[in-house]
């Protein structure tokens, strides 16, 4: 049963203040693939354009597949005009880089716990539908072309779930 979650405004990552250990969902991909980083907590990084996500779950849907992965810490930052997310333990890039700041939704600890338990039970569709209803449609899209374009700074990056997509 989904918890009653209050609707909160979706902001862009560049507008986030100090998180004080709040739980968040960062939409890191929209378009052909849909991807979210669901984090138990976040805090500011060393630079104003950085946040560090703690106890993150990466949930990705594309084609007929849904996958998830876990990361202890994920750095979300903007470098040279590109927003990207990197698993700090493996230095793997989490697709997909974006020229737009990632949308961020602050959630309750109870909301995070529900998503974590639902993902652990492999009921991914429930979480994906829940998040799709909370993030605005349109306005944010990503293109995986940045991962293969020879002129891109990401063309040689090692990617989480590289075989996926």
Image (cartoon, grey):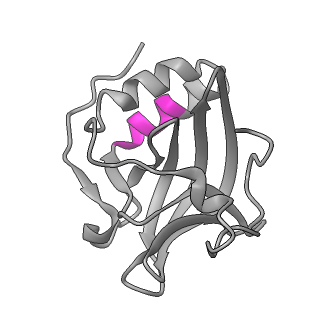
**Residue placed furthest toward the bottom:** 46
Image position of 6 with respect to 142: above or below: above
- The stretch in magenta equals 108-115
Image position of 136 with respect to 123: above or below: below
Residue 51 makes an appearance in the image: no
Image position of 91 with respect to 116: above or below: below
- The residue that appears at 77% across and 48% down in the rendered structure is 162
41 relative to 87 in the view: left or right: left
Q: Which of 131 and 8 is in front in this view?
A: 131
Residue 94 at x, y percent in the picture:
63, 56
What main secondary structure does the magenta stretch of the protein show? Answer: helix
Toward which corner of the image does residue 59 lie, by quadrant? top right
Say which quadrant the C terminus sits in. top right
128 relative to 69 in the view: left or right: left
95 relative to 158 in the view: left or right: left
Residue 46 at x, y percent in the picture:
48, 87
């Amino acid at each position: 049963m989904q918890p009653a979650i209050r609707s909160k405004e979706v902001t862009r990552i560049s507008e986030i203040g100090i998180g004080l250990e709040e739980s968040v969902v960062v939409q890191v991909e929209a378009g052909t693939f849909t991807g979210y980083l669901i984090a138990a907590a976040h805090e500011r990084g060393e630079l104003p354009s950085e946040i560090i996500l703690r106890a993150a779950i990466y949930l990705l849907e594309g084609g007929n597949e849904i996958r998830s992965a876990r990361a202890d810490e994920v750095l979300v930052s903007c470098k040279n005009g590109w927003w990207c997310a990197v698993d700090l333990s493996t230095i793997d890039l989490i697709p997909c880089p974006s020229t737009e700041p990632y949308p961020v939704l602050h959630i309750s600890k109870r909301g995070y716990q529900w998503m974590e338990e639902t993902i652990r039970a492999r009921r991914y569709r429930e979480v994906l539908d829940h998040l799709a209803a909370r993030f605005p449609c349109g306005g944010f899209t990503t293109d995986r072309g940045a991962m293969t374009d020879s002129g891109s700074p990401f063309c040689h990056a090692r990617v989480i779930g590289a075989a996926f997509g």
